[in-house]
Amino acid sequence: GTSTFDGTALAHAVVKHLVDRSGCIAMFATHYHSLLDDWRGHRDVRLGHMECICSDDSDDAGAGAGAAPNDHDITFLYTLGEGACPRS
């Protein structure tokens, strides 16, 4: 595996290559939110996220066997939303 620092550096280098050298249209997914600050406002980069609805499953009666108290139900909407993901 890679450390967070190494992973962020690698992800940044890949985006930089795609933007500066390839100039292609690409969708790049990452969980390194620090990249947002590096690329926000760049004229050739558009930020987006896959829309979803997260609901709290705080009713323990509805939780399945072995479910943790912080479990969430996630419904994916299969829609590309504008901007960065509001939460991780």
Image (tube, grey):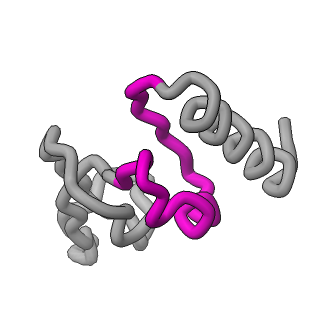
Q: Is residue 74 magenta?
A: no
Which of the pair 41/15 is nearer the observer? 41
Residue 40 image offset from top left, x and y in percent: 48, 64
Direction from residue 58 to residue 22 in the image, left or right:
right
Q: Name which residue lies at 38% across and 63% down.
A: 84
The residues colored magenta run 24-47
Direction from residue 29 to residue 7 in the image, left or right:
right
Residue 15 image offset from top left, x and y in percent: 61, 39
Which of the pair 13/58 is nearer the observer? 13
Question: Quick check: 70 above or below 15?
Answer: below
Residue 65 image offset from top left, x and y in percent: 36, 51
Direction from residue 28 to residue 60 in the image, left or right:
left
Q: Name which residue lies at 16% across and 39% down.
A: 78
Residue 61 image offset from top left, x and y in percent: 21, 68
Q: Name which residue lies at 57% across and 30% down.
A: 18
Direction from residue 64 to residue 81 in the image, left or right:
left
Question: Quick check: 58 above or below 10?
Answer: below
Q: Please identify the quarter of the rendering in which residue 82 is found.
A: bottom left
On-image quarter of the C terminus:
bottom left
Q: Please identify the quarter of the rendering in which residue 10 is found.
A: top right
Question: What secondary structure predominates along the stretch shown in magenta?
Answer: loop
On-image quarter of the N terminus:
top right
Q: Name which residue lies at 41% across and 72% down.
A: 69
Question: Quick check: 24 above or below 20?
Answer: above
